[in-house]
Image (cartoon, rainbow, N blue to C red):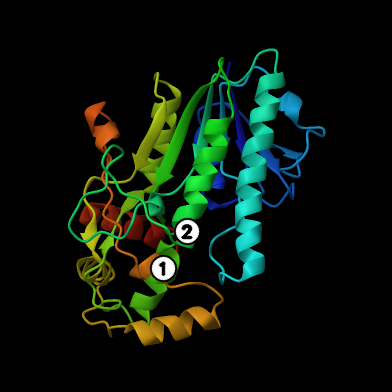
Amino acid sequence: MNKIVIAGGSGFLGRALTDYFVKQNKEVVILSRKPGISQQQRAREVYWDGKTLRGWNHELEGAEALINMSGKSVDCRYTEENKKLIYESRLTSTRVLGTAIRQCKVPPKVWLNSSSATIYRASYDKLMDERTGETGQDFSMDVCKQWEAAFNESITPRTRKVILRTAIVLDPKGGALAPLLKLVKAGLGGKMGDGKQYFSWIHIQDFRKVIDWLINRPATGVYNVCSPQPLCNIDFMKLLRHSLNVPLGLPLPVSLLKFGAQLIRTETELVLKSRKVYPQRLLDEEFVFEFPDLKAAIENLCQVEAKKN
């Protein structure tokens, strides 16, 4: 069994996982609402609408793993319309995947379903691990809670199930790092807000290794997918400046961040919420991070990007 099925695999993280698994000579099938957008020549793309069992569900037969990353991007303004789409795209796709698995003669061995480390409340002091972490009541946290509930509702006795509470994945190809690097180069790489908020993260290489590791061991339940060393924003921005040889960076007050977020049609939560998340289960089960330290991670990513330019 060497087939990996990635639902919503045309996004940033889906493309990274596809590259990783095709290099291992796995058969990778991407379930996508827009086949062709990922430009993955060595993967097979199959149309799905994320709602109905039409023409894609047979792809799950005999799969080594199903990885669900489907859902509208949260990099948008939280209008009522966008909130509805964020909920529906996650909950509906998760439920229909559960239905498809139950109908399989040979179901996937494991189903890994995305969630987010933002499920935890803002924290400046307490490390939020899988057992003692505390959730809250805002929109983003509620999305995660409902998403995980939809996943847990699906009973799949022949398929192992894992929830991925993933922190911000660092990769200059996409996600949060690329725009932050642009800010630093433009001289705007100072602290954001008061700079005291914590930043939980994981290097793209470790993210891919965690997914592979979870597939190949008897893991079940919730895992925090993040480095064991969260860092406050003021120190994070200092590391970015150092790695790019930029000596100074103007600070960005909350008012300016909110104004900028309106201009580019996004929200400030990504940089202002204090995420202090800890991967207790990964450490207890002896997963070895290649980049547990943010300084080494940033330097590696900046070097990789510099070689390409």
Outermost residue, left direction? 125
Residue 71 located left or right of residue 281: right
**Labels 1, 2: front one:** 2
Residue shown at the point (43%, 30%) measured from the top left: 212
Q: SS class of the residue under badge 1?
A: helix
The residue identified by callout 1 is 269
The residue identified by callout 2 is 140
The relative height of residue 105 versus residue 228 in the rendered view (above or below) is: above
Q: From the image, which quarter does the N terminus lie in? A: top right
Q: Are marks 1 and 2 in contact (CB under 8 Å)?
A: yes
Q: SS class of the residue under badge 2?
A: helix
Outermost residue, front direction? 137
Earlier residue among tags 1 and 2: 2
The relative height of residue 157 versus residue 51 in the rendered view (above or below) is: above
Residue 111 located left or right of residue 99: left
Q: Amino acid at mark 2?
A: Ser
Residue shown at the point (65%, 50%) measured from the top left: 89
The relative height of residue 280 versus residue 197 in the rendered view (above or below) is: above
Does residue 135 appear anywhere in the picture?
yes
